[in-house]
Image (cartoon, rainbow, N blue to C red):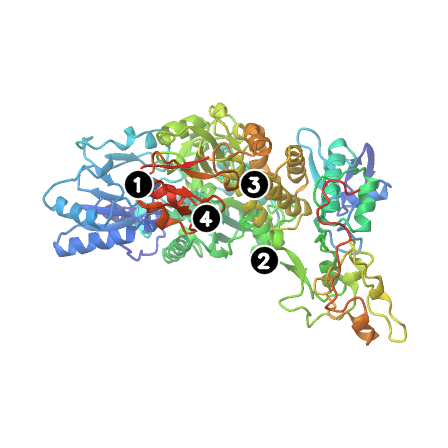
Amino acid sequence: MPRIRINGIEIEMERGTTVLEAARFLGIPIPTLCHDDGLKPYGACRLCMVEAGLPPRHRLQSACTLPVEEGLVVQTHSERVERARRLLLELYVATCPQSKTIQDLASRYGVREVRLAPAFKDCIQCGKCVRICAEQMKAGAIGFAHRGARRDVRSPFRPQSEICRRCGACLYICPVCELRCQGAKPDTVLCSACINFSPACLHYHDQAMCFLEPCAACELAGPLRLAGPLSKDRVWHKPLPPKLHGELL
Amino acid sequence: MNVAPARLATLTHLRLAAARGRRTLLPEQPKILVGMGTCGLATGADEVFEALRDELQHRKLDYVLAATGCIGWCGMEPLVDVQLPGQPRITYGRMDTRKARELVRGLERGDLQPKWAVGFLSGYENPLTGKRLRYARQTTRVDGVPRYQDLPLFRHQVRWASRNCGIIDPRSLDEHIARGGYFALHRVLTAMQPHEVIAEVTRSELRGRGGAGYPTGKKWETVANQRATLKYVICNADEGDPGAYMNRTLLESDPHSVLEGMCIGAYAMGAAEGIVYVREEYPLAVTRMHEAIAQAEAAGLLGEKIFGSGFSFRIRIAKGAGAFVCGEETALIASLEGRVGEPRQRPPFPAERGLGGKPTCINNVETWADIPLIVMRGGDWYAQLGTKSSKGTKTFCLVGAVKNTALVEVPLGITLRKVVEEIGGGVPEGRRFKAIQTGGPSGGCVTESLLETPVDYEGLTSAGTIMGSGGMIVMDDSTCMVDIAKFFLTFLADESCGKCFSCREGLQRMQQIVTHISQGQGREEDLPLLEDLGWMVRETSLCGLGQTAPNPVLSTLRYFRDEYLAHVREKRCPAKVCRELIAYRIEPTICDGCGACVRVCTAEAILGEKKQAHVIENARCTKCGACIEVCQPRAILVE
């Protein structure tokens, strides 16, 4: 079994485990947004960066995709790591300032100032929804489209995928917006999920990052939908003034 | 020209093919060659070719008219070469149909038209064999025409990888063999063990020419040591850098060298299948590769039991859809497997687990083309050129503000100054050198004070830029560095695959900030913020694209900070490029009121009576620059 050294602590881990698992086994906290124990590592959020290797060949690498290797030396909280993490979280807050998860992480890792204009994006493209749909639900109803700035998550070509079973796993696993609709409820229950749709994350129903369009819960609720907060003609306003620069927190 | 070759199974067959090739390479009749690479075709080489053929037919002249690849003199295209038997080969630059017809008429009466000639070549050493290809029986002179070897553009060049470019007809296998091609493969298959081949490559200290500079021998050894029934070799020809076309030229002008290199590599590593991953945007290169593979298969140089040995190897072509990131090896593999072209974490390296989970060796076009040389001449011979850590030669595309835009091949370790000022001929008159950017869009910009930097992997890295695949863009003082940073960031933000949050969002933010600065809306705090973001993107991104993408911004911030400050503090663009910060004005004392500017102005921003000084209405002016181009007395000033 490969023997590695994390923050000076030697540990033997089974071949095939990742540095993130090893660190968590030791109780060392490493923040993540795109990692989930039930999904294959993806390495998109870059928050789990650790410093791997010895100088001069030490580099920052994502712990979730870094397999343990004999003699690997890892620092999880070096100055370089902390600085990278802080700058990343600053960018995360600026991208999705409305997300509670991101605000909490930023606060925990010492981000006290955001120098970038808030963008109010709904999605950080961590790919959790895509992966749970493909890996756990065996559906593959949604995926990434386009690249670069235009990249987004969607079902192929049409708003509603034919293979989508409306299971709601994508909503369940999304790390950015916990106030979002939590999925369909049995029809005996008066669904209040939509009430919980905070204007923080949705401006229009059309822009909702909800792949269950129209929302199964809303459909079951029937007439409520017309009067409910998600009616198509109702415009939600952004919770923060758009030109807030540098004084977000 | 396109003689279907018989199956080549022995050394004698190769020699016979070489003899056939020599007869077409140096025929007994006068021969006219036209450079028909993409570069030549873009400037009208096909029309020149047609005109030459028409004129030759019309005059019933028994000349050989042939197409060749690109010799690398991009600024002089279309190029036509005349090769009279026993006489030096004379190159004519900037030809057109009229000149072409006149050239033939002149040749008929024995006039060589030295007024259009740009250089002559009496002989040329073939690095593969060490022998000279002799055009002239003795060293002669052509009046009024410089020798190639005396031209600064060619004097410092050592053409190893591009040995056949512009010399042979890329569609002729015989001519390639006449230049020593496939003899290395024969030697490898009949007289060398796989480990001996790898040892030779290791001894040459060849490093990957795609940009990262990983030692090729080491990579081959890793693949060779893997226990797998199936292994792949891949030729990475996904060249996406703006202003770089080394790989395209090599594939178009000498496809067989790449195939031979891949064959040798496959034998050394025990691979049975090869793939050439080439961009769809290189249609001519794709066609040439298809033709070359078909020829090699017909000749038995690819396929079952090559040269009667037990070694079988096939090559197929895969076309990339033009995503820049697919030049990254793990993204390339993803693309080949039919997935989205996104990189993944290494390790495991493709050499261990690559295409379909099998060991895969991915090398750049140029690396593959260097392999036959190393086998024929030995690793020590190859390592004679270069610096301590970087051996051999490298092709570069020298473009931008230089007199000679060219595709050049130079020994590593040559200084940037020599490349710019001697080979490139310096910046055009009236302008001053400002910066050179090496290594494609994610390279850094280097100032004049660093021109003594040797061109090798370590030297360029220490100057804050990269070797990359070999783009070199020279900029003069009419270039705004903020504008340059904006341009490359826009390219990279668009070409980022978007997987890593840091690269996707970070580059977008940097692009926004730099755009704001170029529009005069920047603040001084933006500069350290840019540096922070750049550092973060470089440190935390997964693949080479993200790790090098901030280079243009970071290096311009480092060397041209005062230019950023002028944009931020004084809202002024010193190079007068950024449109939001400049204004056009007509100097009334110079303007003669001809009205030419009024006619070209699409924004209708220029007012004035005939024969009287005109005025530009600034609110309407889009600063397109059309008026400046037409103004004869140069009355339009940029402020």
Residue nearest the observer in this picture, B210 or A49: A49
Dot 4: within a 10 Å radius of its alpha carbon, few (fewer than 14), some, or many (20 or more) residues?
A: many
Looking at marks 3 and 2 on the same chain, the residue that comes earlier in the sequence is marked by 2
Give the residue at mark 4.
B263
Percent coordinates x, y for residue B220 in the rendering = 55, 42
Percent coordinates x, y for residue A85 in the rendering = 75, 39
Question: Which mark is drawn over residue B384?
Answer: none
Of the 4 image quadrants, the one containing the N terminus of chain B is bottom left
Looking at marks 1 and 3 on the same chain, the residue that comes earlier in the sequence is marked by 1
The chain ID associated with circle 2 is B
The chain ID associated with circle 3 is B
Amino acid marked by disc 3: Gln
Tell me the quarter of the picture where residue B612 sits: top left
Amino acid marked by disc 4: Cys
Q: CA distance from mark 4 to mark 1?
A: 35 Å
Q: For the residues carrying marks 1 and 2, which lies nearer the camera in this image? A: 1
Q: CA distance from mark 1 to mark 2?
A: 41 Å
Percent coordinates x, y for residue B65 in the rendering = 22, 51
Residue that appears at 41% across and 28% down: B432
In the displayed structure, B508 sits above or below B137; it is: below
Percent coordinates x, y for residue A76 in the rendering = 78, 37
The chain ID associated with circle 4 is B
Looking at marks 4 and 1 on the same chain, the residue that comes earlier in the sequence is marked by 1
Q: For the residues carrying marks 4 and 2, which lies nearer the camera in this image? A: 2
Query: Is there a contact, CB below 8 Å, between mark 4 and mark 2?
Result: no
